[in-house]
Amino acid sequence: MTLYPAENYTLAQIIPPENKTVGGLILPDTSKNKLIRAVVLHSYHKDYSCGDHIFYEKHRDIPIQDEDGTDLVLIKDEYIIAKIHQ
């Protein structure tokens, strides 16, 4: 099964946030960002392509799973805050 998002949505996979600082301190959930980092798998938006890293607003996604059980999200393009250049 291949998933293709609707025209105004982006299909992405969440990149789990770091739970520790560089010094080894464990971060509680309350101190983590309100933005989520993800990698784009498919998008019709001209500014995002497969492999791009993005930030989007927390709780603004639709969680889904592909046939392999991989957790993916559908994000409305208007909730994507930034594209990360690496």
Image: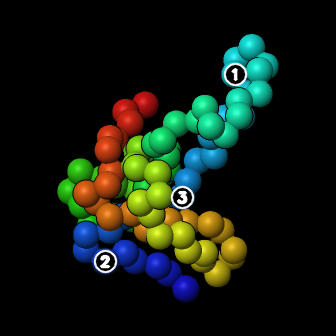
Q: CA distance from mark 1 to mark 3?
A: 23 Å
Whichever of callouts 1 and 2 sits on the residue coming sooner in the sequence is 2
Residue mark closest to the camera, 1 vs 3: 1
- Is 27 placed left or right of 11 in the picture? right
User: Residue 66 is drawn in which quadrant?
Assistant: bottom right
* Coordinates of residue 9 in the picture (x, y in percent): 32, 68
Instruction: Check disc 2 and report the residue beneath it.
Output: 6
What amino acid type is highlighted by mark number 3?
Gln
Q: Is residue 51 visible?
A: no
Whichever of callouts 1 and 3 sits on the residue coming sooner in the sequence is 3
Dividing the image into 4 quarters, which one contains the N terminus?
bottom right
Secondary structure under badge 1?
loop
Residue mark closest to the camera, 1 vs 2: 1
Q: Nearer the viewer, residue 59 or 19?
A: 59
What amino acid type is highlighted by mark number 2?
Ala
Q: CA distance from mark 1 to mark 2?
A: 37 Å
Dividing the image into 4 quarters, which one contains the C terminus?
top left
Residue 13: give its label.
Answer: 3
Q: Among all residues in the image, which is located at the extreme bottom? A: 1
Residue 21: give its label.
Answer: 1
Q: Among all residues in the image, which is located at the extreme left? A: 46
Q: Nearer the viewer, residue 30 or 16?
A: 30
